[in-house]
């Protein structure tokens, strides 16, 4: 089932990929295969991100992070947390991506804006 989801993901059919990954996830959870379930939550998070469904993507990436933490997979946990941050940035939209930049004392965009083009008023 997971491989079918992967095929649909490669074709860009996010809805079908999500459906098949969901089926595979149900199977893994029923069998108690927690490491595989954590990985599948991540795959679901990926297809939801591509589809622009950021709320669902965040929910799945957070479940993935929790699953990797519980199974002791530290690299998987770190990767899932990184994806949570990335999806949160996407969900903020382009207007809010520069909100972290420091406000320059001159009142104009400068080197402290880290490449952002936002102008301070």
Image (cartoon, rainbow, N blue to C red):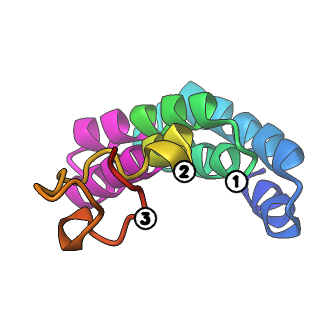
Quadrant in which the C terminus appears: top left
> Mark 2 and mark 3: span between their CA atoms?
11 Å
Q: Secondary structure at mark 2?
A: helix
Q: Which residues are magenta?
A: 64-86
Instruction: Give whichever of discs 2 and 1 has the lower sequence position.
Output: 1
- The reply to whether discs 2 and 1 touch (Cβ–Cβ < 8 Å) is no
Residue holding disc 2: 94
- State the image coordinates of residue 61 (x, y, percent, origin top left): 46, 40
Residue holding disc 1: 50
- State the image coordinates of residue 102 (x, y, percent, origin top left): 17, 53
- State the image coordinates of residue 2 (x, y, percent, origin top left): 72, 54
- The reply to whether discs 2 and 3 touch (Cβ–Cβ < 8 Å) is no
Q: Secondary structure at mark 1?
A: helix
Q: Is residue 19 magenta?
A: no
Q: Nearer the viewer, residue 59 or 120?
A: 120
Instruction: Give whichever of discs 1 and 3 has the lower sequence position.
Output: 1
Residue holding disc 3: 117
Quadrant of the rendered image containing residue 7: bottom right
């Amino acid at each position: 089932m997971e491989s079918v989801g992967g095929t649909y993901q490669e074709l860009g059919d996010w809805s079908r990929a999500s459906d098949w990954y969901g089926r595979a996830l149900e199977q893994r959870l029923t069998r108690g295969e927690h490491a595989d379930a954590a990985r599948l939550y991540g795959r679901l998070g990926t297809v939801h991100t591509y589809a622009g469904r950021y709320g669902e993507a965040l929910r799945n990436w957070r479940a993935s992070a929790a699953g990797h933490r519980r199974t002791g997979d530290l690299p998987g946990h770190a990767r899932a947390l990184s994806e949570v941050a990335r999806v949160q940035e996407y969900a903020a939209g382009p207007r809010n991506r520069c909100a972290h930049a420091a406000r320059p004392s001159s009142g104009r965009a400068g080197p402290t804006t880290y490449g952002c083009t936002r102008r301070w008023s």
